[in-house]
Image (spheres, grey):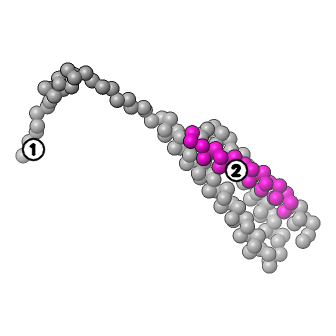
């Protein structure tokens, strides 16, 4: 393995380790009963930067990887990026779900006194017959 390839792989390993730690924090936040959407947005922003760095490194590694090892390299890269994409989608979905819950008006059932309920029955609209 050439020194250039070794340097790229070592750098990628460092960034992947940091990305994995971030994904773990993201998974933990998504798994909470009431996830913090601001934290999720922060995690997604940082994850996008790390993903861009990994894509650049992966491209550089693929360019200098011997043909015999290329299939293994691409497979490994795709598996890792699938995990990143999966958690980006889950976090985005969770943010949308939490915002929907937050924006949905709360409906409260109010009990009417018996006299009000009787008044409603007496003021019932007539049945309509359509010919």
Specify whether 127 is left or right of 55.
Answer: left
User: Could you tell me which residue is drawn at 64 percent across and 56 percent down?
Assistant: 85
Q: Is residue 85 visible?
A: yes
Q: Are marks 1 and 2 in contact (CB under 8 Å)?
A: no
Give the magenta part as a residue range: 9-34
Q: Quadrant of residue 41?
A: top right
Q: Which residue is mark 1?
A: 130
Specify whether 88 is left or right of 52.
Answer: left
Q: Residue furthest front?
A: 114
Query: What element does badge 1 sit on?
Result: loop
Which quarter of the image is occupied by the N terminus?
bottom right
Q: Compare residues 54 and 122 and report the one nearer the observer.
A: 122
Q: Which residue is mark 2?
A: 24
Q: Is residue 47 visible?
A: no
Q: Quadrant of residue 52?
A: bottom right
The dominant secondary structure in magenta is helix
């Amino acid at each position: 393995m050439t020194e250039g390839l070794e340097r790229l792989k070592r750098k990628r390993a460092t960034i992947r380790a940091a990305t994995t730690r971030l994904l773990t924090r993201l998974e933990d936040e998504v798994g909470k009963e009431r996830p913090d959407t601001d934290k999720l947005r922060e995690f997604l922003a940082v994850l996008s930067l790390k993903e861009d760095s990994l894509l650049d490194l992966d491209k550089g590694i693929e360019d200098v990887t011997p043909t015999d090892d290329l299939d293994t390299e691409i497979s490994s890269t795709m598996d890792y990026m699938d995990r990143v994409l999966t958690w980006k989608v889950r976090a985005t979905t969770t943010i949308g779900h939490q915002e929907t819950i937050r924006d949905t008006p709360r409906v409260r059932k109010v009990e009417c006194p018996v006299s009000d309920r009787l008044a409603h029955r007496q003021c019932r609209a007539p049945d309509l017959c359509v010919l």
